[in-house]
Image: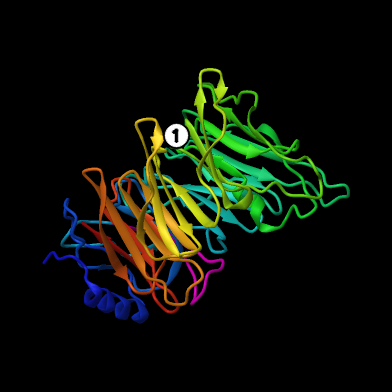
Amino acid sequence: MMFRITTAAAAVAGTALMAGLVATVPANAGVEWGDPQEVSSRYGWQVQLSDDGEMAAWIRVGNRPGPGPVRTSKYKGTKKGWSKSKAVPGSAESKEVVLGQDGDTLLIKLPTAYATSTRKGASNTWRGVETVADGDNLFGGALSADGQTVVWVKPPPMAFPPQPGTLLARTRAADGSWGPETQVGEFISRGNYYGGSERTWVALSTDGSTVAWLNNSAQLVSAGKAADGTWGAPSVIQQYSNDQFRNPEVSYLQLSANGSRVLWQSANSAVLTSTQTSTGWAPVTYVMQNDLSSVAMSPNGKVVAYGQLDPARLRVRRYKSGEWIKPKTLGPSQYPQIVVRNKAVAWVEQESKASKLRVSLLRKGKWRNTTVIAPKAQSPALSRKGDTLAYAGKQAGGIFSVKR
């Protein structure tokens, strides 16, 4: 039976989570979310969904995030629900996983490598991992939607003064093999090179056409990929201070699906953006300023959701008729983990022991139907149309998904 999840229903879902369930829901093209169905009875994190919402991937771990095997499950329909999950061969110590949006390729970070795995036909069976990059401390790995392009950063040996890293890429050939490593550009070096924020200094458009990063001149730049797989010269988006002992204040770097818009968070928590023109990147403009936490952008580059610190709330702003229209408050939050699609936003609280998972839908130009899906959740993932929502339960919970 279909119904909109209420507070009471969310409490039931939370009970299931604590028992270690993972779930999804019968489909409904409307605004009501269906009942959870079990995907897996074991906990995991870094939950991923394909564009059509029919393939799920995650890293299975104990009761907290950490390395573990990548597991996958395939949605078989309303009555049969999700298939029994399977481990990807060779993925036992995975630290990160990215599912290509077509659901056919996985990018997996292993202790000393990035590797890919491809799906056998339309099944839930995956081939053993194939190394695409090896070395210590690799980071910034990203995969295009079709699984044909991979980028990552190779850091240099520790040295003083710090040396630049290298942004590298590989493109899959027509026969399915990976082409040679290609150097896209130098990556910024700083005294605290290995400290966390640099991992958000690389972004790849989902169509694989554009990559953005911080280079060794403290410039935020991008490069485009030609049809033959070669990368063009970098184009400057923004210049930052080139003090080698100071990190540029850049985080949450991201590109729209076709690479036409770039967005990031900068000094004083300001959210900045620019768009590509025929002559390069347009002058940088503000989306929002001051007192912000995390931020995320939709694939079409026209919806931006962000956490506001005081008052603590999740807000969303849309680009319409050539301007960013007045922000809309969707619900409470302070440091949200956000997933944005063109017509849906889902979020949880990153630093809360009791984090409610909420989702809101864009209907006829207005944000409506903000719904509590679960009282304790993390790692939300949304399908392209926003009609499937997957998530992991906190503590001893599992992986769930709902459909509408």
Q: Quick one: 387 or 240, which is closer to the camera? A: 240
Residue that lies at the very extreme toward the left in this rendered image: 1
Q: Secondary structure at mark 1?
A: loop
Q: Amino acid at mark 1?
A: Asp
Q: Is residue 160 above or below residue 43?
A: above
State the image coordinates of residue 315 (x, y, percent, origin top left): 40, 55
Whether residue 88 is visible:
no
Query: Does 226 sit left or right of 315 as displayed?
Result: right
Residue 277 to residue 7: above or below? above
Question: Residue shown at 29%/50% (left/top)?
Answer: 386
Quadrant assignment for the N terminus: bottom left
* Residue 44 spot, x, y in % from top left: 44, 68
Which residue corresponds to the image point at 37% horizontal and 42% vertical from the top-left? 102
Residue assigned mark 1: 207
**Residue farthest to the right, as pictured:** 160
Residue 152 visible in the snapshot: yes
Q: Residue at x 48, y 34 (%)?
A: 261
Q: Viewed as shown, does residue 204 lie left or right of 360?
A: right
User: Which segment did they paint magenta?
Assistant: 58-74
- How crowded pointer 1 is (Cα within 10 Å; few <14, some 14-19, many 20+) is rated as some
Closer to the camera in the image, 145 or 89: 145
* Image quarter in which the C terminus is found: bottom left
- Could you tell me how many numbered marks the image carries? 1
Near-viewer residue (242 or 109): 242
Residue 72: name its quadrant: bottom left
Could you tell me residue 39's position as x and y percent? 31, 66
Identify the residue shown where x is 53% and y is 56%: 292
Q: What scheme was used to colour the molecule?
A: rainbow
> Is 350 part of what is drawn in magenta?
no
